[in-house]
Amino acid sequence: MTVKEKIALFPNSPGVYRYYDAEGKVIYVGKAKDLHKRVAQYFVPPERLNTKTRILVSKIADAQFSVVNSEADALLLENNLIKQYKPKYNILLKDSKTYPWICVTGDEFPKVFITRRVEKGNHYFGPYSSVMHARNLVEFFREIYPLRTCNLKITSEAILRRKFRPCLEFHLGRCKAPCIGNVSKEEYAGYIDEIVRILSGRGSEVIRHYKALMAQAAERLAFEEAQAYKEKLRTLEKHYAKSIITQAADTDADVFSLVLDGAEAFGNFLRIRGGAIVQSLNLGFRSQIEEEPATMLATFIGEIEDKFGALSKEVIVPFLPDVEIEGVQFRVPQRGDKLALLELSAKNAKEFHFNSIKQREHTDPDAFRMSVMQDLQKALGMKELPRHMECFDNSNIQGTNPVASCVVFRDGEPSKKDYRRFKIKTVIGANDFASMKEVVNRRYSRMLAEAPDDLPQLIVIDGGKG
């Protein structure tokens, strides 16, 4: 059975399809609301496909599918299969590093620490794109709560048997020594509950709780207890003063933005809880075929859902993705606080894009300069690569002392030895057009006479239509 005959039997159901090459290797994984209709779009006359997609189709030797219950399930399965097979023609994550998580262990007396490994039985928060942010959070918790940092297997039975002795952290007042039963399981669980609430973006609840306890202690004239709550409040409020708080108070939402650069995309994700940004992550993608922006955004959303769990009920996006998820409303804001959140996310994505470009400039300068020239050639619709570029500008002081300058770029870099400055000889007064005509004529008359093979591919002149 040929591939065309096989895909003709694909069902009209949501699912994931896989393309294989002649060696049986997965070369592309895709999701679909309707498997039959989506896969049929690849097997049309070649002139209706772009170049990269034609190359993909020419490599397909077999096709398989998996049916799922919904588009959301298809998105998650597609994400997992891409990670498993790493298909050549799929959108692939550029940043494969392991991000840190904050782990709250499942022990009787849990520990709170940073890790890059996720294991069953523990509670994880993150991932955090900045390890410094994660460390600051853990240090903040240890400043407020007397948490244990040891690796002891503390159980009620071990405490009764007096198996352990308190360590230096207890004598320094930084741990209440649960290892010797110096703090009850219920009291310690209270610390952990507050930490979990803060990590879940519900820090305002903890602040309100402490304010109520402080007021109750003051009414009972228990001033030392009230002062202890006041100190914790001060530390909490100081921490939240450093956090980014949005104007949209009490907002719970996820925000996505994308910067597209050819076959690459640079995305930012923000998780908003109670008006505070509790998570922020940047991810880069690259596709070997020309994917639609809506598909790139759906891939980004699937990756975030895989990392962070279920999405918020409200998801703010710059445009609608090509996926629908039950219980999730995608919103493209036009004004107000939601638009401000989207603009903040877009600002992060643009910075990530810029930093990626700068990093590429340092790691592979030749490839970077070539990509810049190719982008310029494409943007201006040039037939040749602008390896030699010259730029002109005029200057005068209220009509006197007119001069012009020419700066030169070769292979994407300034060629300062070729820079020239011209004194205007034939034009009187402030006449930029006539001055520019003189300078350009002098420059290229001489170049045609002395070095006709060195003419620039691109000339940029500062000025209007005249």
Image (cartoon, rainbow, N blue to C red):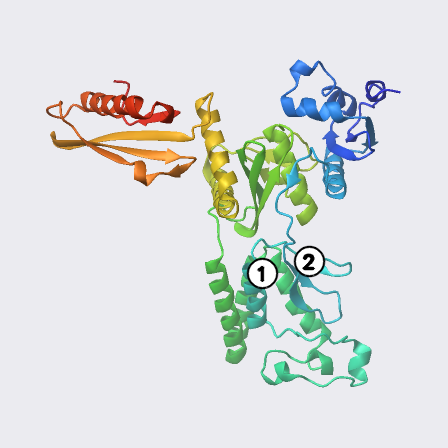
x%, y% of residue 440?
A: 25, 23
Position of 453 compared to 315: left or right? left
Amino acid identity at mark 2: Tyr
Left or right, residue 70 beside residue 464: right
Q: Is residue 287 above or below residue 55?
A: below
Which of 104 and 369 lies nearest the eye of the viewer?
Answer: 369
- Give the Cα distance between marks 2 and 1: 12 Å
Of the image marks 2 and 1, the number of the one nearer the N terminus: 2
Other-residue count near label 2 (Cα within 10 Å), few / some / many at <14 / 14–19 / ≥20: many
The quadrant in which residue 291 appears is top right
Task: Name above or below for residue 324 compared with residue 83.
Answer: above
Please provide percent x and percent y for residue 373. Answer: 46, 32
**Residue in front for this viewpoint, 409 or 352:** 409
State yes or no: discs 2 and 1 in contact (Cβ < 8 Å). Answer: no
- Please say whether residue 309 is visible from this viewpoint: no
Mark 1 element type: helix
Q: Judging from the image, what secondary structure is the residue with disc 2 in?
A: strand
Tell us which disc is closer to us: 2 or 1: 1
Please identify the residue farthest to the right as the structure is shown. 1
Q: Residue at x 85, y 18 (%)?
A: 5
Q: Position of residue 87 (x, y in %)?
A: 73, 37
Res. 409 mark: none
61 to the left or right of 343: right
Specify the amino acid type for callout 1: Ala
Residue carrying label 2: 124
Q: Residue furthest front?
A: 450
Residue found at x 20% / y 22%: 438
Image point 53% across, 70% down: which residue?
232
Image x and y of residue 169, in percent: 62, 81
Residue for badge 1: 134
